Image (cartoon, rainbow, N blue to C red):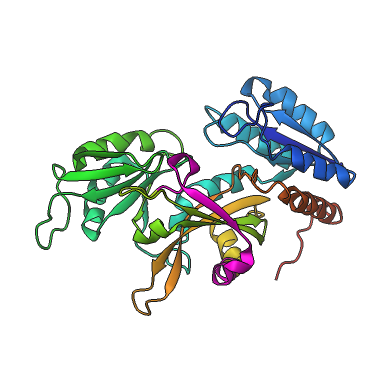
Amino acid sequence: MKQHVVIFEARGGSDKGEYGYRPDSKPIIDSLSERGWTSEIVFYRDEDRGEIYRHTLERAGAYVSRVNPGNLRDETGYFQMLRELVKHGVVGLPHPDAMINYGAKNCVEKLKGTDLVPRDVRCYYDFETFKAEFPRSLTHGVRVAKQNRGSTGEGIWRVEVIDELPANATAVKLDARVKCTEAKDNHVEEMTLGEFIDFCVQYLDGEGGMILDMPFLERIKEGEIRVFMLRNKVVNIVHKKPADAPDAFSATLFSGAEYSYQHPSEWPDLVNLVQKNVPLIRERLGGYDLPLIWTIDFILDTDAVSGADKYVLGEINASCVGFSTHLELSEDVADEIVRLMEAEAVVNPRWMAFTA
């Protein structure tokens, strides 16, 4: 077993510290070193893909991917390299297809009808379907339209019809006025529905183009609850409360949201909900090994029948989850890497392990 880990990053982006790499990567290296393992940060570039592949295959028993969506112009080459590394025995933390399946916004649609997601969600993969169906969706109330691979709230829009709808309307007309608020910075734009739909064509272009359509939950004002996962364990809770402004609904730091960090014991009902549903999440999202570090974001809602609180899953993040405010979590991350690698080392890969 090679006791060496390569941590992949990409140069640039707002997630880097003063020395050019993520501030929460070096603590992982230090924690692994304390356990007798070596590790290094490698900055991925398509131009160096072959050299990086050979270097990693020769030295590493595992890689940890810490590349934010958007820090690479195109992730195709990067994911191809990761698949080849996994194919030839390097343990992927996570597997590239797990990153795609967990991080894509349609993971919410794949989980609809469960304890986590209501049925009133859907994804659009082409412009004509979006143009035909989104006006119908808006008759049910305020909606949130999310592009697939954005970050920090970019391309996440709350859409509210300004004009009064006729009684028994089955679709909002394309010339109706709508109020659109982007989660990136809570800025508001008013336009016709047709103009908004035309604007969104950019989110449907190219491989992975997609828009998730889900109901806007008013209780987002009380905050989004981010569950920080280390594989199948809840290790931290982040309560993200939007800025106190009339149109604010974004839970990003960039938009002025306030973050508070809490122990999982303060959210027992939510932790139980997550732990109970981890096997279902894994099954619905492709059956891959769970990501090393991932998060599940929830919004509070109210059960229409009982009036009790309930939690609605808004999205999952698995590409590059940070923990720079709690660097001590590197100890847990290192322990999990070592445990996983030791477990991998005693199982012959020709025969799968039994799972109940």
Pick the residue in front: 97 or 149: 149
Asked where in the image residue 179 lies, by quadrant, the reply is top left
Does residue 173 sit above or below 42 in this rendering? below
| Residue 104 shown left or right of residue 141 in the figure | right
Q: Residue furthest left?
A: 166
Which residue is most to the front? 244
Farthest residue in the right direction? 36
Q: Residue furthest top?
A: 47
Please indicate, yes or no, whether residue 49 appears anywhere in the rendered image: yes
Q: Is residue 48 magenta?
A: no
Left or right: 344, with 304 as reference point: right
Q: Residue sitting at 37 percent across and 37 percent down?
A: 203
Tell me what residue is drawn at x 49 percent, y 49 percent. Answer: 258
Q: How many marks?
A: 0
Residue 192 position within the rendered picture, expressed as x and y whole percent measured from the top left: 18, 40
- Location of the C terminus by quadrant is bottom right
On screen, residue 50 above or below 263: above
Residue, x 30% and y 53% (percent of image)?
Answer: 143
Magenta region, residue range: 250-274
Q: Determine the residue positioned at 64% across, 19% down.
A: 47
Corner quadrant of residue 314? bottom left
Q: Is residue 26 above or below residue 264?
A: above
Residue 266 is inside the magenta segment: yes
Q: Position of residue 28 (x, y in %)?
A: 76, 43
Q: Is residue 170 left or right of residue 266?
A: left
Q: The N terminus is located in which quarter?
A: top right
From where the camera sits, is residue 150 visible? no
**Image x and y of residue 32, in percent:** 82, 44
Is 70 located above or below residue 87 in the figure?
A: above
